Image (cartoon, grey):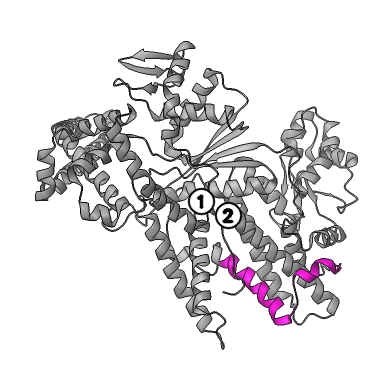
């Protein structure tokens, strides 16, 4: 049960007697930020007073005169200029805790009208190993799937892998011209990744070399203009205002030139790379031609593609298995290739797609750039594939909603995609881009290795488990008698390490960039998975020491006593689980669940420190506190499981 929803339901008829539209006012009833203001606070009296032309406190009193919360709340109070403070009755809180004791769902009931939601997430390029850039989409998407399923929706998780794009033309070209047979036999995926990187490097080298004179000219012109402005600024105050912008232009031009020079030098300083570059001056064009042949059905290129794909997919699946993540569908771009000509023809027949400089485009009002669905060389684009995917999800999967868990840098693409979908006539399907920020290093730049390479996801997981093992070993070795076998330590280290990485990502608002920090990630205090996991293990330890079976408590009907502020605070946190779940799904923000988990673990910590369980004043009080402990453990277990994070009974 979502207590906030219950409170709002009771306020709705009282407000409807005053104004026709109560929804905005109900949204202003929220959990209180401070317990001294009660459990919930209604802040609508001030804006409502403006509508009615009356003092806010008078309006608040009018609402209270029409409001009945007596069956589960203490009499509401008006505070300050017109705030309405609501506090649940202690007996109601206690009885509700008693009702849900032993319930892993903490009283949360499945939705009455389930929807079919397709969640498109992770979506790596199969031609190269997964890296840290894939982390956010993967863990955010998985958490959303788990939470949607928990509340009762039908969910189809779809890993829309990149298995058909230009990267395969580059790999095919590299395989034919630069393949190392020994490396290929030893590690097919590693060799394909090397070939992809090499063809990319050589293509960029030629492109950058061709662009270098323009960059040099841009720097010269920017510096000359800056010098002119500096001379004019001596006599003209207005010009001074232009200097700052011009200095930024010079800095930007210098940075682009420096990056280009460094990129060229990396090739020229390597005799083997320079020889390869000189031997393949048209490598970018020829790689595109390999892609075109693949898409056109060339037997040799298709045979190579079929040879490459199984090893690439298995490398991805190894990562997913370690993360405990699975997909209902793994339909890559290749699956939709046969549909692409029909998509373009359909857009043309509706007058949406038109030729522009040889390319077929959809022009959208308010967008300067067209939405290209077919290039001048006849090749299709991501836009075409995404349109075909939407059609498939609506007609074949019968989806009600599609979520795209994709980097926020793709926002413009999805705006154009959704707008084109509407014009195309696909209705009754909700589409949402669940965007997210970037994983940053301590330099506030995208997280990379010291060598400047993108951090591989597999090595990141290995490092997390290795660091967690040191923590687990230290904690167990401090015990008078260690409790964990070497096998247990390895298992717990994996739970702690992988949980730390996932939680560190999920506890940030998905819109934000965040700095990757090992020390914070695996800290045993603060807002970390490790802190939650230790809280769970602490409860298990309490029951283990008292030799009480947690499962047996379900049928005992123990009365719950809330005699202290700490007991009541913990109970209230547990009853706010439904609100936390609904908040997450309101706009698909898993960090709202981590916030509830942290507040719950913090409330338990205060309860544990100030309300003795083992030395409780009476057996009745001890049993009551054990009920709270058990329910808190269930809450942590369930909440973390919705984030894809495991727990251990001994840590």
Between discs 2 and 1, the one toward the N terminus: 1
Find numbered disc 1 in the image and state the secondary structure of the residue it sits on: helix
Residue stretch in magenta: 531-560
Residue 253 or residue 169, whichever sits in front: 169
In front of the other: 207 or 594: 207
Q: Main secondary structure of the magenta part?
A: helix
* Residue density around tag 2, few if under 14, some if 14–19, many if 20 or more, within 10 Å: many
Alpha-carbon neighbours of circle 1 within 10 Å: few (<14), some, or many (≥20)? many
Task: Please provide percent x and percent y for residue 58.
Answer: 84, 39
Residue carrying label 2: 643
Mark 1 highlights which residue?
A: 139
Q: Is residue 361 at all visible to an observer of this figure? A: yes
- At a point 89% along the width and 39% down the height, the residue shown is 66
The answer to whether marks 2 and 1 mark residues whose Cβ atoms lie closer than 8 Å is yes
Q: Quadrant of residue 24?
A: top right
234 versus 534 height, above or below: above
């Amino acid at each position: 049960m979502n207590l906030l929803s219950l409170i709002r339901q009771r306020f709705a008829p009282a407000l409807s007697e005053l104004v026709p539209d109560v929804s905005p006012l109900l949204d202003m009833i929220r959990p209180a930020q401070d317990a001294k203001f009660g459990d919930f606070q209604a802040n609508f009296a001030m804006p409502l007073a403006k509508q009615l032309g009356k003092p806010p406190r008078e309006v608040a009193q009018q609402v209270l005169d029409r409001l009945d919360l007596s069956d589960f709340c203490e009499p509401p109070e008006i505070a300050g200029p017109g705030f309405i403070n609501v506090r649940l009755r202690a007996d109601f809180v206690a009885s509700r805790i008693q009702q849900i004791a032993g319930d892993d769902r903490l009283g949360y009931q499945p939705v009455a009208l389930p929807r079919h939601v397709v969640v498109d997430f992770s979506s790596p390029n199969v031609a190269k190993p997964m890296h840290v850039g894939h982390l956010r989409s993967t863990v955010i998407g998985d958490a959303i799937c788990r939470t949607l399923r928990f509340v009762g929706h039908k969910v189809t998780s779809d890993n829309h892998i990149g298995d058909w794009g230009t990267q395969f033309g580059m790999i095919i070209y590299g395989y034919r011209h630069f393949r190392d047979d020994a490396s290929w036999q030893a590690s097919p995926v590693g060799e394909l990744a090397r070939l992809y990187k090499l063809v990319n490097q050589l293509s960029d080298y030629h492109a950058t070399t061709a662009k270098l004179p323009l960059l040099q000219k841009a720097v010269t012109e920017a510096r000359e203009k800056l010098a002119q402005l500096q001379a004019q600024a001596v006599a003209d105050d207005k010009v001074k205002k232009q200097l700052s912008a011009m200095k930024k232009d010079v800095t930007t031009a210098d940075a682009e030139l420096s990056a280009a020079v460094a990129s060229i030098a990396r090739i020229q300083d390597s005799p083997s790379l320079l020889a390869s570059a000189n031997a393949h001056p048209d490598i970018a064009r020829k790689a595109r031609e390999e892609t075109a042949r693949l898409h056109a059905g060339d037997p040799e290129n298709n045979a190579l593609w079929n040879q490459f794909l199984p090893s690439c997919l298995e490398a991805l699946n190894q990562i997913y298995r370690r993360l405990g993540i699975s997909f209902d569908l793994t339909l890559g771009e290749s699956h939709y290739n046969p549909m692409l000509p029909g998509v373009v023809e359909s857009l043309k027949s509706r007058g949406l797609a038109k030729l522009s400089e040889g390319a077929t485009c959809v022009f959208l009002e308010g967008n300067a750039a067209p939405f290209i669905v077919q290039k001048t060389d006849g090749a299709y684009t991501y836009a075409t594939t995404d349109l075909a995917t939407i059609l498939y999800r609506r007609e074949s999967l019968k989806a009600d909603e599609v979520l795209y868990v994709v980097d926020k840098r793709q926002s413009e693409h999805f705006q154009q995609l959704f707008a084109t979908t509407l014009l195309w006539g696909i209705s009754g399907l909700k589409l949402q881009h669940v965007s997210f920020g970037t994983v940053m290093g301590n330099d506030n730049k995208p997280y990379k290795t010291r060598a400047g390479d993108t951090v591989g996801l597999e090595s990141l997981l290995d490092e997390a488990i290795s660091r967690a093992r040191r923590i687990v070993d230290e904690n167990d070795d401090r015990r008078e008698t260690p409790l964990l076998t070497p096998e247990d330590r390895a298992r717990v280290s994996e739970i702690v390490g992988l949980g730390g990485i996932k939680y560190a990502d999920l506890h940030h608002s998905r819109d934000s960039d965040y700095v990757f920090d090992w020390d914070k990630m695996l800290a045993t205090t603060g807002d970390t998975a490790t802190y939650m996991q230790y809280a769970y293990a602490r409860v298990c330890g309490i029951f283990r020491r008292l030799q009480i079976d947690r499962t047996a408590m379900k049928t005992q009907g123990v009365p719950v006593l809330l005699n202290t502020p700490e007991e009541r605070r913990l109970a209230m946190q547990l009853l706010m689980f439904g609100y936390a779940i609904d908040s997450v799904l309101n706009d698909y923000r898993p960090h709202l669940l981590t916030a509830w988990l942290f507040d719950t673990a913090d409330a338990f910590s205060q309860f544990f420190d100030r309300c003795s369980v083992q030395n409780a004043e009476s057996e009745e009080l001890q049993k009551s506190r054990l009920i709270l402990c058990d329910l808190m453990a269930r809450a942590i277990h369930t909440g973390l499981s919705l984030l894809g994070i495991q727990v251990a009974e001994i840590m």
